[in-house]
Structure formats: structure tokens, C-alpha cells
Amino acid sequence: MDVIEITRQLGKAIQADERYAKFVVAREANEKDDALNELVGKMQLIHMSYQHEASKEDANEQKLEAYEEEFMGIREQIMANENMKNYEAARAEIDAMMNYIVGLLTECVRGEDPETCEPPKEHECGGECSSCGGGCH
């Protein structure tokens, strides 16, 4: 087997994983949530208004602050939405799984034994990338 074929098999296994199924359900619930999508649309418009004002040579600081406050208020509403909470939780599980997989592959590329290697745990990182070569961000 070649690496690409094995990678495709890994992709199928990921899509068969219960974490992926939860993520898909949560994403679809978000897409169908009209109230949530309306809030997201409002937030995007506020962001565009903020960017437009900020790009002006004589940008009005009061307007910028008002846009920022409105943006944060809508963001809080979005994050309080039950569908968004479920989506964020499911996405975090997928992200953790993918980080683990990439970590395993990284260790293999570094020459570690594919049968026994484990990626460094996040809490083991001291924040100094020169000690491990980075790759966690």
C-alpha cells in the first residue's frame, strides 16, 4: 500500500468515528438555525462596518467603540445559543482527535517507532518551541 491510499483509509475511519458524526450533526443544526444565522449575519455586517470605519484616515473612535460593543454583544448571544454550544463542543473533540493524529504522524516522521510513539501532551509543552521544533500551533 502507498501512503496516499493509507491516508484515504484513515479519512474513511475518521468519518466513521462517533466524534465526526456528532460534529456533522452539530454543524447541520447550526446551518438550520435561522436565529443563529441571523445573528452571524449581523455580526459580519458589524465587522464590515468596523473595518470600513477603521480604514478611514479620520476614523471616528466613538463609532469604532460602538461597533466593537455591538459586535461583542452579538458574539455573546451566538455563543449562548444551544446549537452553537453543541457545535463548539463537537468541534473541540474533532480538533483534539486531529491534533493527536498529526502528533503521532510527526513523531513517526522524526523517526520514532510507529507502534509505540506518543505525541507530547499539551501540558508538557513549556512554550519554548526550540525544544521540540514547534508544530503544535
Image (tube, rainbow, N blue to C red):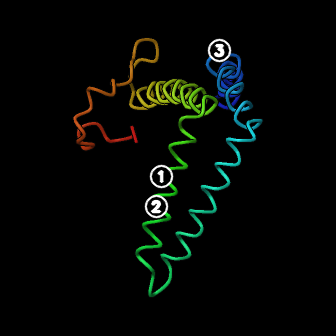
Answer left or right for 61 relative to 26. left
Answer left or right for 10 relative to 104. right
User: How far apart are the alpha carbons under marks 2 and 1?
Assistant: 6 Å
Label 3, residues with CA under 10 Å away: few <14, some 14-19, many ≥20: few
Residue that carries the numbered disc 3 in the rendered image:
18
Q: Amino acid at mark 1?
A: Met
Tell me which numbered mark, 1 or 3, is placed earlier along the sequence.
3
* Quadrant in the picture for the N terminus: top right
Is residue 96 or residue 88 the one in the foreground?
A: 88
Give the mark toward the camera: 2 or 3: 2
> Looking at the rendering, which quadrant does residue 6 occupy?
top right
Q: Secondary structure under badge 3?
A: helix
Residue drawn 60% across the image and 67% down it? 48
Q: Position of residue 134 (x, y in %)?
A: 34, 41
| Image marks 1 and 3: residues in contact by CB distance under 8 Å | no
Label 2, residues with CA under 10 Å away: few <14, some 14-19, many ≥20: some
Residue that carries the numbered disc 1 in the rendered image:
72
Residue that carries the numbered disc 2 in the rendered image:
68
| Image marks 2 and 1: residues in contact by CB distance under 8 Å | yes
Give the mark toward the camera: 1 or 3: 1
Residue drawn 42% across the image and 66% down it? 65
Tell me which numbered mark, 2 or 3, is placed earlier along the sequence.
3
